[in-house]
Image (tube, rainbow, N blue to C red):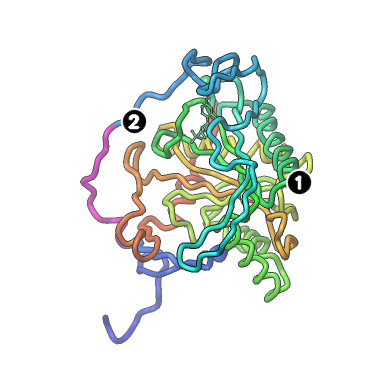
Amino acid sequence: MTDSPTVLDLSDHPHRRLNLLTGEWLLVSPHRAKRPWQGDETPPLPSESAAHDPQCHLCPGNVRANGMRNPAYSGSYVFANDFPALTAMRHSLDAQDDILRAMPAAGEARVVCFSPHHSQTLPELSQHQVRQVVDVWCSEAAELSRRYTYVQVFENKGAMMGCSSPHPHGQIWASDFVPTQVATEDARQAEWLGARGSKLLAEVVEREEREEVRIVDRNEHWLAIVPWWAAWPFEILLVARDDVGTLPELQDEAREALAQILPRITARYDRLFATSFPYSMGWHQAPATSSRPEAWRLHAHFYPPLLRSASVRKFMVGYEMLAEPQRDLTPEQAAERLRAIEPFPQE
Ligand code: H2U
Ligand code: ZN
């Protein structure tokens, strides 16, 4: 440690940044991005292109793992997950244990096939087809939130993320409890509104539009940024610019704009390392039991694991597991790279 500190340079010196949505700090080490790399750089597997796979459990007309047959669907298709993590049966706890604590958990899980096509991912679908996915997310969230406290809409993409089927699909898990991360964001946004009289993510949007350096893409209704506090190298936060707290509240124009920006974001991802980019993405919205639903701004998180090529990923191990998340590439550098990509170059 030197005893006369120089002024912190965010693009060069180690520093910590606060994730306003979780209250957690992360370590940024920009100087380390320059170090030599001797890791694995094996080329990616060739990507799928078949329109229909007779072995696929999700393709139209095929039999699923539990013996049910999918209809010959032509748009997006939703079915009840055959192996749900949550079931609708409600249970009660007869005695509270202070040491080995538990609580009952009930809910429902569904699978959303984005389209009948076995290989076309979001950037390969037409805007009309992506709009169908958006409408399904909104209508499913509306229906399930009448019976459940929280509806988690998400997509796990790519074998690297543990996705079990290459047929593009997402999942919806509804629960009679508010999951941990959502409860944290709920409390943080409520606290922010109470303290500052404004919405946390509205202030973030306003600030990021002024600074520009972390913007990846935008349209009239949405702003896509690599957030100030991003933990994953190419993490994206997609925030609604309209004053909405849940998916069902999205109006026609915002849904259409979402169907426009989603393929653009995911096409940038695919072109970054010339591979079908793996990620987990999902929506965060106000839970039905929020004490301050008006503090919420609807948003989606994209958490992709890749760091420097189609096969070299970031591992959240060591310091990340035991202390706090850490990154080398700055969010500003990541945003600059994603922003520079032309999502759909003219052929
Ligand atoms: P991934 O998004 O992680 O690939 O999960 C796909 C889900 O699809 C998984 O939760 C369900 C699995 O239970 N599934 C069915 O419900 N029926 C099937 O026939 C295959 C997969
Ligand atoms: Zn399929």
x, y percent for residue 160 = 39, 37
Distance Cα–Cα, label 2 vs label 1:
43 Å
Picture coordinates of residue 64 (x, y %)? Answer: 54, 21
Is residue 229 or residue 206 the one in the foreground? 229
Mark nearest the camera among 2 and 1 is 1
Disc 1 on helix, strand or loop?
A: loop
Overall secondary structure of the magenta section: loop
**Along the polypeptide, which appears first: circle 2 or circle 1?**
2
Identify the image quadrant of the N terminus.
Answer: bottom left
Q: In this view, does 293 lie to the left or right of 100?
A: right
Q: Mark 1 points at which residue?
A: 146
> How far across and down, in percent of the image, does residue 203 sit?
66, 65
Amino acid carrying label 2: it is Pro
Q: Residue at x 27, y 38 (%)?
A: 41
* Numbered marks: total: 2
Residue range in magenta is: 31-42
Percent x, y of residue 74: 66, 18
Q: Can residue 34 be seen in this view?
A: yes
| Label 2 within 8 A of ligand 1 by Cβ | no
Drawn side of residue 298 relative to residue 45, left or right: right
Let me know if residue 306 is in the magenta part. Answer: no
Mark 2, secondary structure of its residue: loop
Q: Which mark, residue 44?
A: 2
Relative to residue 77, is residue 321 drawn left or right?
Answer: left
